[in-house]
Amino acid sequence: MKMTFRWYGEKDCIPLQYIKQIPGMSGVVTAVYDTPVGEVWEEEKIARLKTLCDEAGLAMEVIESVPVHEDIKLGKPSRDRLIANYAQTIRNLGKYGVKCICYNFMPVFDWFRTDLHYVQENGAVCLAYKESDFQKLDKKNLRLPGWDESYTPEQLSGLLKEYEGMTHEALFENLVYFLKGILPACDETGINMAIHPDDPPWDIFSLPRIVGREEDYDKLFAAVPNKHNGIT
């Protein structure tokens, strides 16, 4: 097992030099954060990250994440171009020693909390989820912690509307289609795809969740039997 630390690139308030000081730390989990979702990660940007990590004495073997475009999850006609872009990003990452890509297939929200500043009894601050707080949310006028900067209210409303009628079965089929499109690139590069469990692992706002139970993984691995298809 290798000990690694999440690093959000050069704009992260925690510099690599601080991460290196942590006893036993061998690398960082990072990503290219300024490329629009669905576009190919340029080699120059990947090389820049790799150089910075190498200079700090930290390995860059895991990427979290290369985001999956919503059009792929929705199964839109544009998905073939976006999947081809994703595969090219995998090939580009493979040139710089990346061994694993963590990703998720959660509609709209790849994590969800009702409180980003929950204070525990010992004074420590953490993220938290309370079902009672969730039930108080106005589904027609959502103001969500952590997502205010990602979507305008209009964008969020529009995206939720696009998912109306999406079933668990259809979303799973779109995941299988995605994996079959990118795994040849994984075979070429040796990169493993590690899917993140749904967070939380139950439906929210009528959005289906399909990765969270043991039987979900069994179903996925049976549908896409490839050694590079894994979980995080």
Image (tube, grey):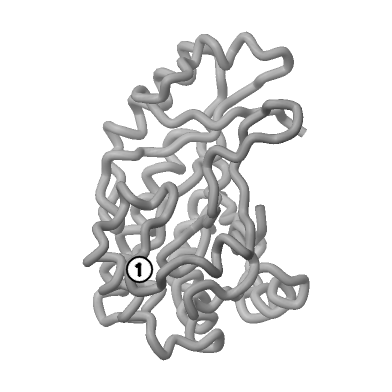
Q: In which quadrant will I find the N terminus?
A: top right
Picture quadrant of residue 122: top right
x and y percentages locating residue 140 in the rendered image: 34, 74
Q: Is residue 211 left or right of residue 143?
A: right
Residue 177, placed above or below residue 46: below
The residue at the point 48 percent across, 35 percent down is: 30
Query: Label 1 crowding class (10 Å Cα cut-off): few <14, some 14-19, many 20+?
Result: many
Residue 96, placed above or below residue 86: above
Q: Is residue 186 visible?
A: yes
Picture quadrant of residue 226: bottom right
Residue 122, placed above or below residue 64: above
The residue at the point 68 percent across, 26 percent down is: 123
Q: Amino acid at mark 1?
A: Glu
x and y percentages locating residue 24 in the rendered image: 73, 17
Q: Nearer the viewer, residue 142 or 152?
A: 142
Q: Is residue 90 visible?
A: no
The residue at the point 30 percent across, 33 percent down is: 45
Q: Is residue 161 left or right of residue 214?
A: left
The residue at the point 49 percent across, 29 percent down is: 7
Q: Nearer the viewer, residue 181 or 22?
A: 22
Residue 33, placed above or below residue 195: above
Helix, strand or loop at mark 1:
helix
Q: How many marks?
A: 1
Q: Is residue 206 left or right of residue 129?
A: left
x and y percentages locating residue 66 in the rendered image: 42, 50
x and y percentages locating residue 5 in the rendered image: 60, 28
**Residue where numbered disc 1 is placed:** 70
